[in-house]
Image (cartoon, grey):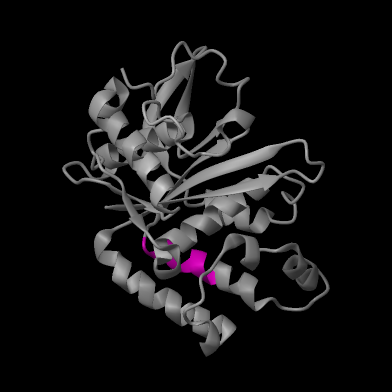
Amino acid sequence: MLFFIDESWQTTSDGKLKIGVLSALQMKSHDFNECSLELFKLKTTHLGHAAANKEIKGMHSLRNYLFRLEASGIKSNELNLIRSVFAYIKTKGVTLFGSIVLEESEVDLSCADVNELERPFFFLFERIDEFMKENHPGLMAKIIFDDRGAQANKRISASVSNFFHKCSAGKRCDTIIKVPFFAISTENVGLQIADIVAYILGCSFTARKSEIIEFYRLVKGHEFKSRTTTEVNGKKYSHYGFKVIDKKKEAGDSHDPGRVI
């Protein structure tokens, strides 16, 4: 099972809040080649043959200008491409996960300390592991990050591997292959769609929330919902694939779950 992971950073219009999103897109290994071919066809259909090898980026394909055009009655081929992408992945049973970071100290998602996995990564892996155990017992998840360059890749790889090998919380995520993989997003449709998902989730916390609501609903339609529940004050709450992280909500944490000990 493949899990493509990408990130997005955005700032609210008043500049007071920086938002970081780490998203993961699940795809069956045997669907990947078909998905690559289908995305090639969709880009050709909506944008013309010259765009067949173009990388889809959320920041570009969902820019404000295109929404203003549609509001004035002018069809946007790029927005229609994104609609078609979501319609297609629905047929493949794709599931989405995400960590949305509102705490400034964790926004960069850089794995600066290789002995301490940042919370956004931990919460993402926790949900991926839960998904695998509930839906695909006996199979393993392969996590694939967007290439960030040799040094950044090395930090991420060391941090993730240390977490899975040395941390008690990481050892419990035993459905995930313990070494991450890296790929070039320009050649990888999974990473391109994960980028779009991350961008949409980020927009939902900025002034663009109302503008992008149609696409946010498409993303939410693919969100993982666990069969596992947690009881709080007599009420049962389901576990969902999107985790919003901010200092206030996490203030009750007694420890850092990603600390390598």
Q: Residue at x 40, y 30 (%)?
A: 117
Q: Position of residue 111 (x, y in %)?
A: 44, 36
Percent across and percent down for residue 150 are 39, 51
Quick check: can you spot residue 199?
yes
Total numbered labels? 0
Residue 133 lies in what quarter of the image?
A: top left
Compare residues 196 and 82 and report the one nearer the observer.
196
Magenta span covers which residues?
84-92
> As rendered, which of 102 and 147 lies closer to the eye?
147
Magenta span dominant secondary structure: helix
Q: Depth check: 135 or 150 in front?
A: 150
The residue located at (26%, 40%) in the rendering is 176
Residue at 80% from the left image edge and 76% from the top image edge: 73
Give the image location of residue 183, x and y in percent: 36, 59
Q: Quadrant of the C terminus?
A: top left
Residue at the (59%, 53%) spot, across then down: 199
Q: Quadrant of residue 205?
A: top right
In the rendered structure, the answer to whether residue 62 lies left or right of residue 196 reads right
Q: Quadrant of residue 171?
A: top left
Q: Please say whether residue 90 is one of the residues in the magenta stretch.
A: yes
Q: Position of residue 82 (x, y in %)?
A: 56, 68
In the displayed structure image, the side of residue 58 where residue 44 appears, left or right: left
Q: Is residue 137 above or below residue 70?
A: above
Q: Which residue, as the protein is rendered here, is positioned at the far bottom? A: 49
**Residue 113 is a magenta residue:** no
In this orientation, does residue 103 appear?
no
Instruction: Say whether residue 245 is left or right of residue 167.
Output: right
- The answer to whether residue 33 is above or below residue 212 is below
**Outermost front residue:** 151
